[in-house]
Image: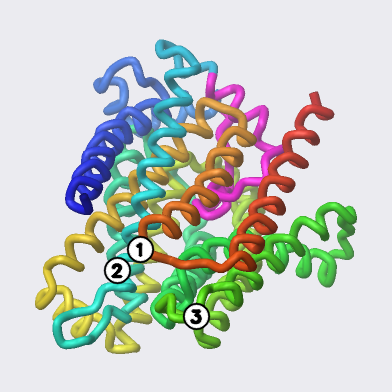
Amino acid sequence: LRQTYQARCFSFLLLAIFSSVIAAKSNSPSSSSLTSARRSFASLDKKASNKVVPTALGLDTLLHQRGGSSTEATATMSKESAGLPPAVKLLIGAGGIYAAFLYYGSLQEDVFRYTAADGTQFKQAWLLQVLEALANVAIGFVGMQLSGATPGIPKKAFAISGASQVSAKACTSLALANGLSFPVATLAKSGKMAPVMLGQILLSGASYSVREYLQVAAIIGGTAIVSMGKKKGAGESSSMLGVGYIILSLVLDGVTAGFQKQLKVETAKAGVKPKPYDFMFWTNFYMCLTAIVVAGALNEIGPGLAFCSANPEIFSKICKFAVCSAVGQSFIFYTIANFDPLILSTVTTTRKIFSVLLSIFLKGHSLSLTGWSGIALSCFGILSEMALKMGGKAKAH
């Protein structure tokens, strides 16, 4: 049964890889033929100047986009995508995101739960970030060539944003490596608005509604209840070190959001409008460089590769994990190019909930009634946040 499940998931992955090429072409200045995609950068830039694309958005921002500012941009881009009916495009985009990231989450959990014959486990979280970023760089490069590279991009701003973003992702992996269960980690990451709100309140005097405070409190409170509501003897327990890493990851998410705002300012000053695959390539390029430096400093590269060599099964999972990340991000670009950001937000929000439920039912997590009440509370907070954005969008129209 497990082999059948993995075979089906891998077939979804192959379909996603094929469709990501279509996604890349849909973001190109002219998707009618491959020949037009190979025109000179000067010709591509001239055409791109008449397009409006979501600017200064890191991949993590796109995954958790709050909608609003790029609505007009995505509406403009969607007009260019002729041919397929909107329902089919949504099926491709949402289906690709679900297939890639549900499998991505399953593989990430498998990597850190894997135990070798000698009892050792994979702990090299920074090496994992190197391999994941490399896959994103490769697909980002292909997409950038198809859509046309944007000259004059401020590399320093991308370097700072990329370093912060990969640090947040590494802390999430370290939380899993140090005993935090995947459902708890995923729910906790859904509360990333907490550090963002705190930073905005302290630094810029922003204010939020009572409902927004209650939503964040529901997500955080539900996560805490789930963490405490696991049945005794269920296996893994959420260690304090794992909890510390996930809190640090949330803090870094807030820092990353600030750096990405600065990136928007820098690109505006430079007078450039990077395309989606420019962001994918350059952000992951600097994420990869940062991860290589840290992994080397922590002596993770040699031992990590040796562990993978001695355990081919886990290396296969890591490779699939990295490819799922890159393909999933391509589908995110495809979706945001054809639909309102609120559609993307809805897909990624519900995907998190399904990731949690999939992990509970397929990975042997055992929850008490208290734990299930925590799941319900967190999901309520997540869905309430999504409903608030949908209501705000309706009023805007």
Relative image position of residue 29 (x, y in whole percent): 42, 25
Relative image position of residue 324 (x, y in whole percent): 32, 50
Alpha-carbon distance for marks 2 and 1?
A: 5 Å
Relative to 191, say whether 103 is above or below. above
Alpha-carbon distance for marks 2 and 3?
A: 23 Å
Is 131 left or right of 149, judged from the image as shown? Answer: left
| Circle 1: element type | helix
Residue type indicated by callout 3: Lys
- Label number found at residue 111: 2
Relative image position of residue 83 (x, y in whole percent): 41, 11
Q: Nearer the viewer, residue 175 or 47?
A: 175
- Label number found at residue 302: none
**Residue identifier under label 3:** 232
**Residue identifier under label 1:** 108
Callout 2 environment at 10 Å: few (<14), some (14 to 19), or many (20+)? many
Alpha-carbon distance for marks 1 and 3?
A: 24 Å
Residue type indicated by callout 1: Gln
Q: Magenta stretch: residue 32 in it?
A: no
Callout 3 environment at 10 Å: few (<14), some (14 to 19), or many (20+)? few
Q: Nearer the viewer, residue 314 or 331?
A: 314
Q: Residue at x 53, y 34 (%)?
A: 336
What is the quadrant of residue 143 in the picture?
A: top left
| Circle 2: element type | helix
Q: Residue at x 28, y 17 (%)?
A: 33
What is the quadrant of residue 52 in the picture?
A: top right
What is the quadrant of residue 16 in the picture?
A: top left
Q: Residues at badges 2 and 1 in contact (C-beta under 8 Å)?
A: yes
Q: Which residues are magenta?
A: 52-78
Relative image position of residue 210 (x, y in whole percent): 89, 56
Residue type indicated by callout 2: Val
